[in-house]
Image (cartoon, grey):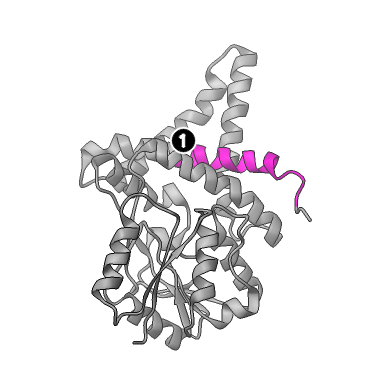
Amino acid sequence: GRVTIIVVDGMSRDGTRERVRAAIERHPDRSLRLLDNPRGIVPTALNLGLAEADADVVVRVDGHCEIAPDYLERCLQGLEASGAECVGGPIETVGETRVARAIARAQSSPFGVGGARFRTGTDRPRWVDTLAFGAYRAEVFDAIGGFDEELVRNQDDEFNQRLIQSGGRIRLDPAVRSLYWSRAGLGALARQYFQYGLYKVRVAQKRGGLAAWRHRVPAAFVVSLLAAAGLSAAMGSAWPALAVLVPYGGAALGAAVLAARDEPAAIPVVAAAFVVLHVAYGGGFLAGRWKFRRGLRS
């Protein structure tokens, strides 16, 4: 009686809607609702859910996520103990196939995702700039509004940065556990991270800067690749390109060995996933600098 579950569906055709309706019929005593999201993007789904939510705490759970049985309990304990406006935990990234599991390893590596603690993990509670699947005090949304519907990606990063700029705090607690299912292939991963990089530029424009330095590193890497390739072509020599590729390749391979030391056969795929993560995100960031070059629009 204290928990309401709101499923906001982007007009899916995979049987989700039927399963939710069946659950509603089987459990009429449960507070379970199904809402339509005709636009089919995450921020509109979140705002539709917020409009229906009537609670002291609102928890976001995405379709690629599976939360632990004690997730809500741990989040509530964390909110009470810390006084934070948002509490969440590190995600354990997993995959269903061999390639997906290798991608999951790359997404959990500091070399792959930088200092994103909610992805790489933490051994103690700590204050962070963002996290996934947070539990928010409901008054936060009354104070700073909902999610920005222009941001197809990174709407949670923008919201969390806005929360911190308004004086709020975000607590990452290792007792709060969840699984995150990675993309199944390198192509899907590239599309995902290109969009992350693209919309990160828009977040920076809206919030007056980036929340962390790590977001600039992949773009700098892509620029160095392009500059080295151009210099190699102008000089008729491979040395400029090798000066960038060899150190990076060695670092990627070393990080892949560390990430997959218990499964040596996965090392080449993990290394390839690192390349995809960095080049796709960096390329997306550079594309965003062009796409959103006019800055904030009226």
Q: Residue at x 61, y 80 (%)?
A: 142
To which residue does mark 1 refer? 248
> Is any atom of residue 231 visible in this view?
yes
Q: Please determine whether, in this image, residue 161 is positioned above or below residue 81.
A: above
Q: Nearer the viewer, residue 91 or 252?
A: 91
Q: Main secondary structure of the magenta part?
A: helix
- Quadrant in the picture for residue 121: bottom left
- Quadrant in the picture for residue 275: top left
Q: Please determine whether, in this image, residue 274 is positioned above or below residue 213.
A: above
Disc 1 marks a residue whose amino acid type is Tyr
Of all residues, the one furthest to the top in this rendering is: 236
Label 1's element?
helix
Q: Quadrant of the N terminus?
A: bottom left
The residue stretch that appears in magenta? 277-295
Instruction: Specify few, some or many for label 1: CA neighbours under 10 Å numbering under 14, 14-19, or 20 or more.
Output: some
Please state the horizontal and vertical placement of residue 145, each as a whole percent of the image: 63, 73
Q: Is residue 260 left or right of residue 201?
A: left
Residue 294 lies in magenta, yes or no?
yes
Q: Please determine whether, in this image, residue 76 is positioned above or below residue 274.
A: below
